[in-house]
Amino acid sequence: MACAIAGAEINLNDRVIYHVADEFLHSTLLQSASMANGSSMSTNTSPVFRVEFQGMSPKGKVILRVTTPDGVWSEQYIASGGKLVVRFQDATHDLADYAFQPTVSNPGVIRLDVRKAAMGASALDGDLAWDSRGKRLAFVTVNATGERTLLILNRELGQAADTGRGALDLEELLPIDGPIRSVAFVSDTHIRVIGQTQQFDQDIPPQGKITSGKSFAVTPTLPAILNVNFMTGAETAAVKGWSCK
């Protein structure tokens, strides 16, 4: 089983098999504050986040909850020096990633650094997808300028972070918009990525390196949200799926 962690790395069986370039390597420090166990605060940033230091786990990790201005919260157990990453955008702020980084300074006390990712940094966008053999893993990264890249990782070639990206079978700039709704191997020789309004399809060889720029197709997608008129008025509804009969 593979999972994405904090939008920046892919973990397989408790081992990092791919790490996106650290988007906070050249980040901007927005605020640094001291917090006691059980305390909460509103950040002195724009936008303003609500941060709660909920306690320490038995393994010594910080239990941190961050709530965005629109009320969406994220909670995570974080080792000292680690970070909880929140992506946020509203009518007055551009899409950006913010890191909340606790460092244990004294028992029951942390120093919390709030950082904003540098422009051009990358993060994972959408879900991960295995091929039917469990040999290839596909995913999409997006940078702060909105460029999206499709990557296909060959599990049999080892840990990409340690092999100079040699485990990558494909790294392809996607000519579609986002956010990404799904990534899927239609078969072991065909990959499909569905964005917000466009769908990317490409035939691929069943094994070996895949040439970037290989022929592909981009087609419009059916809408993910519909406006529905009821007797009580118009409402928006999410589409769970489309089928033709």
Image (cartoon, helix red, strand yellow):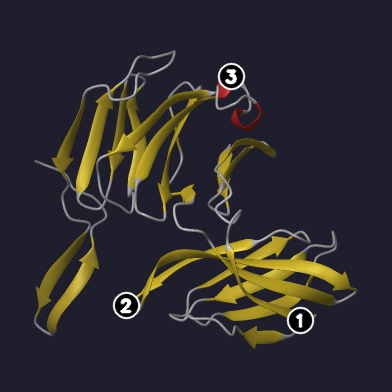
Residue 66 locus on image (x, y percent): 59, 74
Looking at the rendered structure, which numbered label has been put on residue 95?
none
Q: CA distance from mark 1 to mark 2?
A: 30 Å
Q: CA distance from mark 2 to mark 3?
A: 44 Å
Q: Amino acid at mark 2?
A: Ala
- Frontmost residue, 153 versus 55: 153
* Helix, strand or loop at mark 2: loop
* Helix, strand or loop at mark 3: helix
For image coordinates 35% across by 19% down, the residue present is 211
Q: Is residue 48 above or below residue 190?
A: below
Residue that mark 3 sits on: 157
Q: CA distance from mark 3 to mark 1?
A: 44 Å
* Helix, strand or loop at mark 1: strand
Q: Amino acid at mark 1?
A: Met
- Frontmost residue, 135 versus 219: 219
Camera sees residue 126: no
Q: Amino acid at mark 3?
A: Leu
Q: Answer with mark 3 or mark 1, whichever residue precedes in sequence.
A: 1
> Which part of the image, by quadrant, shows the N terminus?
top right
Q: Answer with mark 1 or mark 2, whichever residue precedes in sequence.
A: 1
Residue that mark 2 sits on: 91
Q: Quadrant of residue 75?
A: bottom right
Q: Answer with mark 2 or mark 3, whichever residue precedes in sequence.
A: 2
Q: Is residue 198 left or right of residue 244?
A: right
Looking at the rendered structure, which numbered label has been put on residue 35?
1
